[in-house]
Amino acid sequence: MGTASEHFNFSEFSCKGERCCGHSHPVCYGLIEALEELRESVGEYMGDGRKGIVINSGFRCRVYNRKVGGSLDSEHCKGTAADIRVEGLPAGVLAEIVENVLAFRKGGIGVYDTFVHVDVRRDGPARWKGVG
């Protein structure tokens, strides 16, 4: 599927649904750029520049989004969101680091038990806590 940036491949953003969209992966380059910036910040925080960000969920087609209970107007369906985690870093701590990335500060940040949702929405900041 190809390289999206220095540290991310388009396959990481692919829809994880089965028998829906063929694992399509439209993704906003602003999201990728913000994730690259976040990766650098995480590496500085952890003292390990090699620490990677794991993308649990990137793009979701409408069929898969409905299946996983995503909102009707999900940023995932627009290719502007990702649910992420970093091995060895609690989600709450990751969320604090995420707040330092301007694109995410202007966008959406949702903190869950095991991951953080980040997005580069254009309609103003959104914050929430979830379970999962």
Image: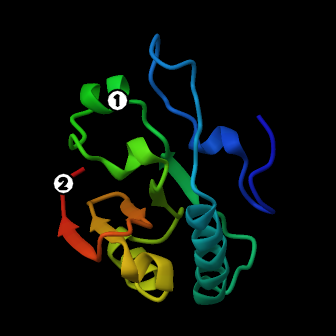
Residue 131's tag is: 2
Q: Measured from the top left, where is residue 123 in percent x and y?
A: 30, 70
Q: Tell me the residue at 43%/47% (across/down).
A: 78
Label 1 to label 2: alpha-carbon separation = 22 Å
Disc number placed over residue 62 in the picture, else none: 1
Which residue is nearer to you in this view: 47 or 73?
73
Residue at 46% over, 84% down: 97
With respect to residue 3, does 115 lie above or below?
A: below
Tell me the element at label 2: loop
Pointer 2: residues within 10 angstroms few (<14), some, or many (20+)?
few
The amino acid at mark 2 is Val
Q: Nearer the viewer, mark 1 or mark 2?
A: 1
Residue at the farthest front position = 123
Q: Quadrant of residue 117?
A: bottom left
Res 67 → quadrant: top left
Query: As shown in the figure, which amino acid type bears the numbered disc 1?
Result: Arg
| Residues tagged 1 and 2 counted as in contact (Cβ below 8 A) | no
Q: Residue at x 25, y 40 (%)?
A: 70
Left or right for 129, reference 79:
left
